[in-house]
Image (tube, grey):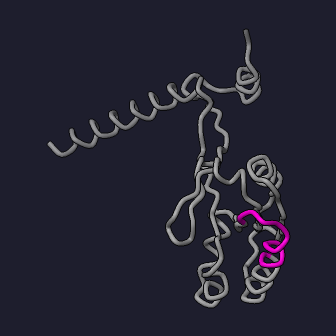
Amino acid sequence: GKTAQDDVGARVKLTSTQSLHFSYIHYREELLGMDGSSLQIESMKSKSVFLFCGIANPSPLKQFVEENCDQLKTKFFPDHHDFSVADAIQLKSEFLKFAKTADQAHILVTTRKDQMRLMNKEIQYHLKELPLYVVDIEVQFLPTTKSKFDELVLNFVSKTSENRDSKHL
């Protein structure tokens, strides 16, 4: 039977030398702490999470964290938000207030992209004591296209290296 992938393939009018592969974003099974520690998604289930980020569409991330934690509080900034020291101070005070509301462990969670914007020394000074974790994503291929894609890449690489080797003779 025809799959949704076949339909898309027909619509984009692939030529015989082109192929179409489908991928999706998958959240990794562990969160990484700022101190290099890691936390399994499993053990997030008993924790309260304060999720903050500045990404275009936070809904999938919010849903993922919500499904995997006990209690969730969110704070969303605009996409590509440049975090200021004032933001850091406010995040810290909101997190500490949130942490008083329940007896279980509380953690802060953000994205890899946002973590990069928090690396400034002054910002770090305000966040360094906090249990801040990064949720990381990886791109995965749908199983039907993965082996085909790997095969194409390997063929391309071996052809390219053969060509390169023969030029050196």
- Tell me the residue at 73%/18% (across/down): 3
Side of 84 where 77 appears, left or right = right
What x and y, as percent, mark residue 134? 63, 63
Q: Which of 24 and 115 lies nearest the eye of the viewer?
A: 115
Q: Which of 165 and 52 lies nearest the eye of the viewer?
A: 52
Q: Which of 10 and 120 lies nearest the eye of the viewer?
A: 120
Spot the residue most to the left: 169
User: How many numbered marks have been drawn onto this rendered protein structure?
Assistant: 0
Q: Tell me if residue 133 comes above or below residue 15 in the rendering.
A: below
- Tell me the residue at 54%/29% (across/down): 146
- Tell me the residue at 63%/90% (across/down): 122
- Tell me the residue at 73%/83% (across/down): 88
What x and y, as percent, mark residue 8? 75, 27
What x and y, as percent, mark residue 79? 78, 67
Side of 4 where 147 appears, left or right = left
Q: Give the magenta-colored segment's residue range.
A: 95-105
Q: Quadrant of the image for the C terminus?
A: top left
Within the magenta stretch, is there residue 102? yes
Spot the residue most to the top: 1
What x and y, as percent, mark residue 107? 70, 66
Q: Tell me if residue 133 comes above or below residue 89 in the rendering.
A: above
Side of 158 where 95 appears, left or right = right
Within the magenta stretch, is there residue 163? no
